[in-house]
Image (cartoon, helix red, strand yellow):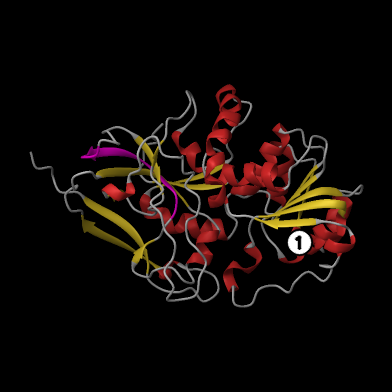
Amino acid sequence: MTRTAVTARFVHQVARPQGRATATDFAFVEAPLPPVEPGGALVENLYFSVDPYMREVMDFGDLHAPMEGRALGRVVESRSDQLKVGDLVAHRLGWRTHALLSPDQIPHRSAAPDPGGVQVRLREPGVPALRSAGVRVVTPPAGVPFRTYLSLLGGTGLTAYVGLTRIARLQPGESLYVSAAAGGVGTAVGQLARLMGVGRLVGSTGSAVKVRHLTERLGFDAAFDHHDGPVGEQLRRAAPDGLDVYFDNVGGDHLAGAIDVLRDGGRIAWCGAVAQYDDAANPPAAPYNLYDVVSKSLRLEGFLVRNHREVQGELEEYLAPYLRSGVLVPDETVTVGFDRSVHAFLGMLAGANTGKAIVQVGTAAAE
């Protein structure tokens, strides 16, 4: 029997941003999908992610093509032995209502789990990007919303977990500073650090409302608005006894401030640099106190979550009991409706969200 033709909708990037991204850099596109080929499958997307790194990708990614990124959906048609209709899947095909999977994009069920982390290699124009569909079947624990695989159980949570356990190696009782602490990765870092027995937990963010969110809802001991004065001075007041670990999502003056306040032997897990995403050609100057990394015997290590896919199962096993019991509640901002995708992305870049920014494709939640 021939199925009814499916028309999919996509968000394409159609222009390079000049500074901040704007709505005119995008276009909504509709197109009929070809039939599912032997060994392939059709996924109806239910949720997808909008993340800060996407702004950086916009400077070199393909134009007139769908924005890439992590997404969650349900298999609605399958000609693959590895996927059946009704399976819930995570993939990395981004901003679209439907994802047509080819046989080579569908791994064997016994393959190593892929967390859906960023699979785009930063490169010069004209050099092919490294891309992967990142398809895997997921089975949410009882009572855990499916969309959690875009937040605490997805690439966002894995980034926080890897940064704390593999890079910073946070120990119980140690003090931790998180920049961009009210964002997706920042909130996950704070929540996971609490589970791991962090001592003093400090965060910086961009508004008084978010400061209260961190201290009143997420259990930070202290937080400050980085607009209220030099980061180093505010950080020293928030952590008068110094710091053991800095989880860096910003770079720039936040990194310099942390280097000032870190104790001898402190560690820095460098995850992102939102301070330069809008103008990558003119990044902030290197920290004035960079040599203190030597004089204080600090360890600074950058990392990409895609290099730690093997940790995904460990993350899920660790967090599932806390999620099921309600001890851990994902911090998310969910924007409803595919038509509001660009709005959600631009709002996230402007700091309108707290926690992980997610787009719910349809009007009804799918759990």
Residue 202 is inside the magenta segment: no
Q: Magenta stretch mostly in which secondary structure? A: strand
| 136 w.r.t. 342: above or below | above
Task: Report the residue at 45% width, 74% height from top.
Answer: 16
Circle 1 residues within 10 Å: few <14, some 14–19, many ≥20:
many
Observer-nearest residue: 102 or 139? Answer: 102
Which image quarter holds the N terminus? top left
Q: Does residue 213 show up?
A: no
Q: Which residue is identified by label 1?
A: 255
Q: Is residue 367 left or right of residue 354?
A: left
- Image location (x, y in percent) of residue 230: 82, 64
Q: Write down the quadrant of residue 29 in the picture.
A: bottom left
The span picked out in magenta is 69-80
**Relative to 339, residue 287 above or below:** below
Answer whether residue 76 is magenta in the image: yes
x and y, in percent, of residue 221 in the image: 80, 40
Quarter-of-image position of residue 228? bottom right
